[in-house]
């Protein structure tokens, strides 16, 4: 009989559909059960795989606390990005389905926020509300232009 239709028990030989048969076959090959991870191994896995994310969040929070203009520019850029995505959704586009939003637009908008905050500090501009308003419009425009040109994000049905 053929195994194409899922007849796993029709062949002669051991049937590996239950755990008992897998363990017996592994014992015959000399494999042992995997030992449980010790507390030290569990902690090292936690620190190497998860802690760096929390460290980055804490660093960003500290940076936003120290440089409130950067925080304001980041929020303005995020609002411009979200507003453009909502406007494109209302115009029957699917901005999250295309690659340009993820590969091009989001990095550009993030860089615009950082550059706007740094340039305004270096040039001594103190009109923070105007800078954030211009940044919001710029990220809205960049998002709209780049996503409208993406063929994967075009019209959705």
Image: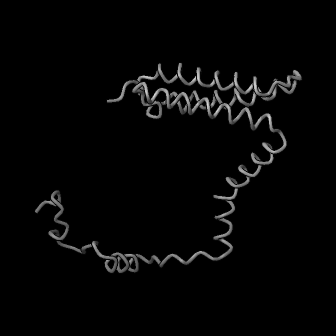
Between 71 and 148, which is closer to the camera in this rendering? 71
Query: How many callouts does the rendering have?
Result: 0
Q: Is residue 45 left or right of residue 132?
A: left
Residue 12 percent coordinates (x, y) = 17, 72
Q: What residue sits 47% from the left and 21% below the top?
A: 148
Image: 65 above or below 8? above
Relative to 155, is 54 on the left or the right? right
* Looking at the image, residue 142 lies above or below residue 13: above
Specify the farthest residue to the left. Answer: 1
Image coloring type: one colour
Front residue (pair 77, 50): 77
Residue 102 is situated, as x and y percent measured from the top left of the image, at: 54, 33
The residue located at (40%, 80%) in the rendering is 27
- Please identify the quarter of the rendering in which residue 63 is found: top right
Q: Quadrant of the N terminus?
A: bottom left
Residue located at (42% from left, 27% from top): 93
The percent coordinates of residue 53 (x first, y second) are 67, 53
Picture quarter with the C terminus: top left
């Amino acid at each position: 009989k053929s195994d194409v239709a899922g007849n796993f028990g029709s062949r002669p030989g051991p049937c590996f559909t239950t755990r008992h048969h897998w363990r017996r076959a592994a014992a015959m090959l000399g494999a042992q059960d995997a030992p449980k991870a010790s507390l030290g191994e569990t902690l090292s896995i936690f620190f190497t795989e998860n802690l760096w994310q929390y460290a980055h969040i804490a660093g960003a929070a500290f940076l936003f606390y120290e440089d409130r203009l950067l925080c304001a520019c980041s929020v303005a850029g995020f609002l411009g990005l979200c507003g453009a995505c909502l406007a494109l959704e209302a115009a029957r586009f699917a901005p999250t389905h295309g690659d340009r939003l993820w590969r091009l637009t989001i990095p550009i908008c993030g860089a615009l926020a950082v550059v706007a905050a740094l340039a305004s500090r270096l040039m001594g501009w103190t009109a923070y509300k105007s800078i954030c308003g211009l940044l919001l419009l710029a990220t809205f425009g960049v998002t709209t232009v780049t996503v409208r040109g993406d063929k994967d994000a075009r019209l959705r049905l």
